[in-house]
Image (spheres, rainbow, N blue to C red):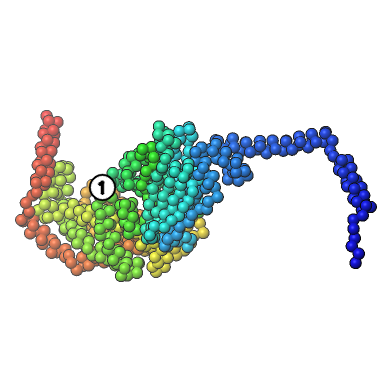
Amino acid sequence: MEEKKLDVNSIIGFIIIFGILLFMLWQSKPSDEEIAAQEKAKQEQIDAVKKEQNALIENSKNVELADTQLETLPDSLKTIALNNKFGAFAYSAAQAASAENPVVKTDLLTITFDTKGGQISEVKLNKFVNYDSIPIYLVKDKNAAFNINFGTTDNRILNTKDLLFQPKVTASGENTIVSMKLKVSESKFLEYRYIIKPDNYLIDFTIKSQGLNDIINSSQEVNLDWTLKTIRHDQSIAYENRYTRLTYQLDGNIEKLGHSDEDNEIEENVNWLSYRQHFFSSILTTDKAFKKVALTSNNLVQDEEIDTVFTKSYNTKTALELSGNEFNENLGFYYGPTEVNALKAAEKGLEESIPLGWGIFGWINKYLFIPLFGFLSGVFPYGVAIIVMTVLIKLAMSFVQYKQYLSQMKMKVLKPELDAIREKYKDNKMKMQQETMALQNKAGASPLAGCLPALIQMPVFYALFMFFPTAFALRQKSFLWTDDLSSYDVIAELPFHIPLYGSHISLFPILAAIAIFFYMKLTTGQQTMSAPTQEGMPDMQKMMKYMIYFAPIMMMIFFNQYASGLSLYYFISNLISIGILLVIKNFVLDEEKIHAKIQVKKKNPKKESRFQQKMKAMMEQAEQQKSAQNNKKKK
């Protein structure tokens, strides 16, 4: 085949085409006016972008820069914006902007941390659900905030809740450590350090800093601010809110704010703070007492019949002391049940936050009823355990009921003689009292003898009243028709709301009210027969008659929204009291024998006590003074 070569004609053709292309390009060249217009438009576009970016940067000095605005800035301008707002801590914000929020899960807790503020943003209790079978959350949807407010040497006021922390999760044996650092550089930082233990609801929490002594303004106060809105967990809003309280330990004593409306206090030397939510608590602990704390509690429930998400709002503010102008605080967060064993495991004395009653009432619950019920509930179902516990308590207190009824029988036997004394000395009140006391002393009978047994029962009565509403073991335990012994039982829903009573009918309070009615019918009748006739007695008898009906009605109304376990206790307790009273009346005490014993005692009266002798002397002296005054008037 013949090889083709590039000839002269081809070369000339290429030259001509190239020339034509150059001519066309020269013809399409813009004029000087067109070039100037294009440059102007381009510059205006650049100026507009810069103006918008500069506005964002300028606003960030005083207003929190929104995350969406921050994302629109290029990296160079983002650093400038952060620096304008956070100064030296812009380094940390720029580094942490894209970090993920750590999540730590144990058998007890699921905890989510937020890089913004370095704080806990969500706490789920893995073993519990609320009345509607929804998992229990103590912290969720920004209902809580933890913030440290401090000044810097470049005249900035910073809040840690606005700053971005760098997270790091590590393991130390069985424990998980979450480090949240707010950095100026790798060697200068503020650190929140959380230690989560697998079998404990207490999270160790330390606040430490390094190399910030030349950044923190030591002349300004450093404040810790902890807020929480408590999430509703119980079926009854009113019942839960009654036991939702801000409690704190002060110099070894337990104090609390009011449970309704707004209450606030300023206290010193506070060891721990408990944001209690009836059966669950969020508690802040400290190794060294907070020297001065401002506490605030607000009731968020305006209408207890309207469904609500939050029940109370709590706030605590306290000043932190720096060590060498650096942070060094050992704190702790307890997120868990308000239950004795769980609180004891924290080893901070937090079990004292359970409202068992003050003084002897709390002692009875702590050392008697809680161990007793713990044993019984390990042997019997919870409802049966309440019944067995009630029977044991009533049998142990039966001697008190015996003494009370015996005193009433003695007064009944003496009633004719006491009425005769009152009739004889109706015009001389002082003499009437002297003769009445003398007769009662001879017979060994006294109205006080009937009151004292009732007073002995009061500590037990009040202790049990405090025990059942706070007994975590009863929570969501069923018995007969009730699904939850820690809440009210429902046998019927009402299509309307009755003030104070509610929109449902509970059966246990009705049964307890019936039992109280029959018990009062028996005891009030006996008291009326034994009480000596005196001035005003008909009115007193009429009032006591009304009380027989009024007390059961109040019981039925008041306890309609209380724990069914408490109503079950009162029902069984009054049934047993009726039984004991009938046994004592029909088989133990005999009115004729009591009368015979009184006659013997009247012949050989017991020696008067010093108190009785003193009272007798005082009455005689008063009688003499009255006689002297009457003689002067006659003259």
Picture coordinates of residue 420 (x, y %)?
A: 15, 51
Instruction: Decide: is 32 above or below 609.
Output: above
Q: Which amino acid does label 1 sit on?
A: Gly
Q: In this view, does 24 lie to the left or right of 358?
A: right
Q: Residues within 10 Å of mark 1 (few under 14, many from 20)?
A: few
Q: Which of 395 and 44 is in front in this view?
A: 44
Q: Is residue 504 visible?
A: no
Q: Is residue 516 left or right of residue 79?
A: left
Q: Quadrant of residue 111?
A: bottom left
| Residue at x 73%, y 35% (from the top left corner) | 44
Instruction: Decide: is 576 above or below 260.
Output: below
Q: Nearer the viewer, residue 162 or 548?
A: 162
| Identity of the residue furthest to the right in this view | 9
Q: Which of 189 and 105 is in front in this view?
A: 189
Q: In which quarter of the image is residue 128?
A: bottom left
Which quadrant of the figure contains the C terminus?
A: top left
Instruction: Decide: is 1 above or below 274.
Output: below
Task: Name the residue carrying label 1.
Answer: 536
Instruction: Decide: is 389 above or below 628.
Output: below
Q: Nearer the viewer, residue 466 or 505?
A: 466
| Identity of the residue furthest to the top in this view | 635
Q: Is residue 101 left or right of residue 339?
A: right
